[in-house]
Image (cartoon, helix red, strand yellow):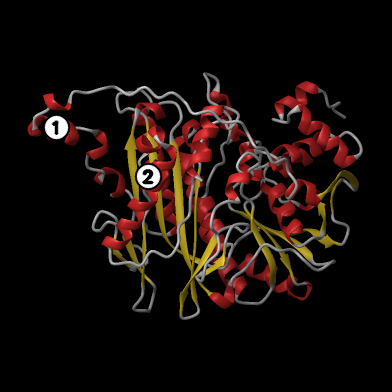
Amino acid sequence: MIKINKRIVSEHGISEDEFKLIKEILQREPNLLELGIFSVMWSEHCSYKSTKKWLKTLPTSGEKVICGPGENAGIIDIGDNEAIVFKMESHNHPSFIEPYQGAATGVGGIMRDVFTMGARPIANLNSLRFGSPKHPKTKQLLSGVVKGIGDYGNCVGIPTVGGECNFHESYNNNILVNAMCIGLVKKNKIFYSIAKGSGNPIIYVGAKTGRDGIHGATMASAEFDDHSEDSRPQVQVGDPFMEKLLLESCQELMKEDAIIAIQDMGAAGLTSSSFEMASKGSCGVKLFLDKVPCREDKMTPYEMMLSETQERMLMVIKPSKIKSTLRVFKKWGLEAAEIGVITKTGNMEIFFNNSLVGKLPIKPLADSSPEYDRPSEKPFIKFKKENHKSFSIKSALVKIISSPNHSSKKWIYHQYDRSVMCDTYFSSEQSDSAVIRVHNSTKAIAVTCDCNPIYCNSNPKLGAEIGVAESWRNLIASGADPIAITDNLNFGNPEKKEIMYAGCCCW
């Protein structure tokens, strides 16, 4: 057994104060497995510990809002017993380290968040930021990211209908890759991740668990240096064909009234999915890791709980539907296994080789992570002064059109299938917003994403407002009535005062 020391605690991204809190919660020191679980669940990526204060200030309810924050995605009522499920999230660090797989798994993850809630994905978008075209890594990063997005969406058969791409030297060593997905669902067929019912079985389905992506969640807020490529094993590997099978099998199972709760195994994998489901249902869980399908030999409980292997789902099933559930997954050629059971204890009990290897209270990890009010400080931003009087109309025009930000993006979006499913009225190259038909109806959905990072850098609050206003105008110009917005803000290390200042202003 590994003895926990300061070095190991620090390597897990846990501060001294947080480690003291962990010991208070457990009334003992954690073992390595338990420390790893705390590490990912209390990471910025999973707990929002530095942004919770500001997230709570956002308006999240309204006449058309069916589901706001707290679930896998937001849901908006569009009438006629129909709703739109949508979400946007980043996959920045993985895409910098391994552009193709990082971007591809970003697309796969956002689609699973949408169909987990019962929706069929109908469109993807993306928002990309790269460094200067003159930087030696930009070409490789750009080509890898674009191909990853295109290959994954094209293989699953979901149209990529819009997006944006900008270049600036500030992104030379930290590109931004944001993926968005929208889906369509019947209002009476929405699924949630609220586990309940003591004795109900927990089913694992999808790809076999490997060692890829371990500590991917904690890496999300890290800073890059000369050794960043050493993090390559933390990048997940995607399989779009497996995703397609998972999508269709879940859609079929959702029609059979078998699912009590369902959750995608995204960041922090089996850990976050099991803890979040149990926390929302105020129940406990027993997990039997010997039953987890693994693709590598001699995987440890630590590796199985923290792996971020893609294309996996966790669900709580009605006991009477176990056989039919397994039959559906077998029909689609998917590995499925009963790996646990819901309890009344409020604890996560983890067993391996008939031994209890971890026991943790669920609520403190899922709901009671530290909440910080980080100090902030307005940065000094020095702008290059230009004598605009020296510009002629001709020279100004030449400067604008010679910018890579105003260059043709056909090379990018021509790699994306925009017409698959036959419901795309307009992609974003044809209108200010992409417009997608609601299948077999006279209704359509307009969707866009927009931001000017230069504005946000110079004045975070005003820049964020301009981003919202620009998106609003895009929708209006396409004939749409704007009814909802989602944010997906990308910041650096929140412990840096100037970065925290930008975050505070944007909310």
Residue at image x 45%, y 49%? 179
Q: Secondary structure at mark 1?
A: helix
Which of the pair 385/264 is nearer the observer? 385
Q: Is residue 196 left or right of residue 45?
A: right
Q: Is residue 413 visible?
A: yes
Q: Is residue 150 visible?
A: no
Which of the pair 99/110 is nearer the observer? 110
- Image position of 146 with respect to 435: above or below: above
Classify 10 Å Cα crowding around label 2: few (below 14), some (14-19), many (20 and above). many
Classify 10 Å Cα crowding around label 1: few (below 14), some (14-19), many (20 and above). few
Which numbered tag is attached to residue 451? Answer: 2
Residue designated by label 1? 396
Residue at image x 56%, y 37%? 235
User: Where does residue 493 sit, x and y in percent of width and height?
Assistant: 56, 30
Tell me which corner region of the image, top left, top right, bottom left or bottom right, holds residue 178. top left
User: Where does residue 399 sit, x and y in percent of width and height?
Assistant: 17, 31
Q: Is residue 148 left or right of residue 399?
A: right
User: Where does residue 298 sit, x and y in percent of width and height?
Assistant: 76, 38
Q: Secondary structure at mark 2?
A: loop
Q: Is residue 429 left or right of residue 447?
A: left
Q: How many dots with numbers?
A: 2
User: Where does residue 460 sit, x and y in percent of width and height?
Assistant: 43, 38
Q: In the rendered structure, which amino acid carries the disc numbered 1? A: Ala
